[in-house]
Amino acid sequence: MSPLMSLKKRTIRIAGFVLLLLGVMSCVKDVDFDQTDDVKLEPVYELDFVYARITTPKFTNPNTGSFVQVLRDTLQDDFFSGDVGGKLLKAELFVSLENSIPVGFDAELKFLDGNNVVIPITTSPIIISIPSGGIGNLQSSERTYAITLADLKKLESAKKIASFVTIDGNDNDLGGELILKSKGIYYTSLLDE
């Protein structure tokens, strides 16, 4: 290789390096470390509330063997109170139903205080309906409910979540299943303002 070709290659490499360096430097912005005071840590928590797999035989009273149209379940929940409750910025409740039973259903969720009294909130009642499904004909329905700031204050006294599932019929001997899922999505602040 001639010395002239070697010099050309070196010059092209140096020019390429200089252009790359200029390109990188032109994309750098001045950093203002005083902006660190404006940083807010706002983690998001997702907690499952209710998960149930329901078949129609569950709509039978185990003591009498008679048909029951509404299933009820209650679980403890005091996430809205205590340290985390005071730092809630907003919350959402996600409810999902999947139905492969050939009848429709309604699912309802209510927040209760320590005396089992329903706490009235803006989005109450939280009800989601699903049409009849079938084996090979899965129906699904989902909704997200935003909980207002005023309701967050009310929910600080919540100790329980009650779920009610109502069957649209009176046959407790059908195939398939209903899957109920719900979760709370909590947006919080780690910093005291």
Image (cartoon, rainbow, N blue to C red):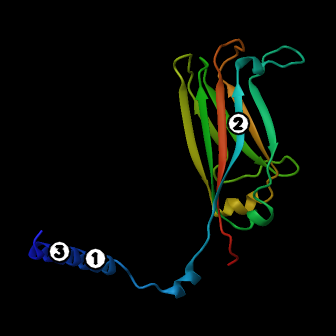
Query: In the image, 65: left or right of 168?
Result: right
Residue pictured at 22% horizontal, 78% vertical: 14
- Mark 2 or mark 1: which is in front? 1
**Which quarter of the figure is the N terminus placed in?**
bottom left
| 97 relative to 184, above or below | above
Amino acid beneath label 3: Ile
Q: How many marks?
A: 3
- Could you tell which of marks 2 and 3 lies nearer the N-terminus? 3
Mark 1, secondary structure of its residue: helix
| 53 relative to 110, above or below | above
- Count residues near mark 3 (Cα–Cα under 10 Å), then give few for <14, some for 14-19, many for 20+: few
Q: Which residue is mark 1?
A: 23
| 143 relative to 25, above or below | above
Per the rendering, the mark at residue 94 is none
How far, Cα to Cα, is label 2 from label 1? 54 Å
Query: In the image, 44: left or right of 27?
Result: right
How far, Cα to Cα, is label 2 from label 3? 65 Å
Q: Which residue is mark 2?
A: 51
Residue pictured at 71% horizontal, 18% vertical: 56
- Nearer to me, 111 or 79: 79
Q: Which residue is mark 3?
A: 12
Query: In the image, 166: left or right of 144?
Result: right
Can you give x and y, in whole percent of width and height, for residue 113 in the image? Answer: 83, 52
Query: Picture quarter containing residue 44?
Result: bottom right
- Could you tell which of marks 2 and 1 lies nearer the N-terminus? 1
Residue furthest to the top in view is 173
Residue pictured at 70% horizontal, 16% vertical: 170
